[in-house]
Image (cartoon, helix red, strand yellow):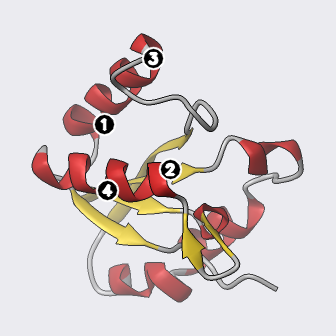
């Protein structure tokens, strides 16, 4: 079974309920369509700790990221991590770090309306 985590933007949490990501996962739609033919479970819904926070200067974020390697196989970055067509620079660095830890990274969850 594929263990899936979703990682979203801290600032999106001010207005985001997570419903778009959860709906797409539950319906195996958009970026989660890849799991239509294999069992998958959502094991984590996490947010970054905000702009300027990095695993090198934020111990709690470092712990959060470290836990992902034990609980997930793949991490999807939420639609909120891309603004005006450009991925957040922290998310780009995080993707590289997660891949280096052996996790698959997928950039996307659901379509933005």
Say above or below: 72 vs 64: below
- Residue under label 2: 7
Residue 73 visible (yes or no): no
Q: Are marks 3 and 4 in contact (CB under 8 Å)?
A: no
The residues tagged by marks 1 and 3 sit, at their Cα atoms, a distance apart of 16 Å
Q: CA distance from mark 4 to mark 1?
A: 12 Å
Residue at 64% in and 35% down: 50
Q: Position of residue 112 (x, y in %)?
A: 74, 82
3 and 2 marks in contact (CB < 8 Å): no
Picture layout, residue 97 above or below residue 107:
above
- Mark 1 and mark 3 in contact? Answer it, CB < 8 Å: no
Residue that badge 4 annotates: 95
Instruction: Work out whether 96 lies above or below 27.
Output: above
Within 10 Å of the Cα at label 4, are there few (<14), some (14-19), or many (20+) other Cα atoms? many
Kind of element beneath mark 4: helix
Q: Which residue is mark 1?
A: 68
Give yes or no for contact between labels 4 and 1 (Cβ–Cβ under 8 Å): no
Asked if the residue at tag 2 contacts the one at tag 1, i.e. Cβ–Cβ closer than 8 Å, the answer is yes
Mark sitting earlier along the chain (3/2): 2
> Which disc is residue 108 wearing?
none
Q: Secondary structure at mark 1?
A: helix
Of the image marks 1 and 3, the number of the one nearer the N terminus: 3
Mark 3 highlights which residue? 58
């Amino acid at each position: 079974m594929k263990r899936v985590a979703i990682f979203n933007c801290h600032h999106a949490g001010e207005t985001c309920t997570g419903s778009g990501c959860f709906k797409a996962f539950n319906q195996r739609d958009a970026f989660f369509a890849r799991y239509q033919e294999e069992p998958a479970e959502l094991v984590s819904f996490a947010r970054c700790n905000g702009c300027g926070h990095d695993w090198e200067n934020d111990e709690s974020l470092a712990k959060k990221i470290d836990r992902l390697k034990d609980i997930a196989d793949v991490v999807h970055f939420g639609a909120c991590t891309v603004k005006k067509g450009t991925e957040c620079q922290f998310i780009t660095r995080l993707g590289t770090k997660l891949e280096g830890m052996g996790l698959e990274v997928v950039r996307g969850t659901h379509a933005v309306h």
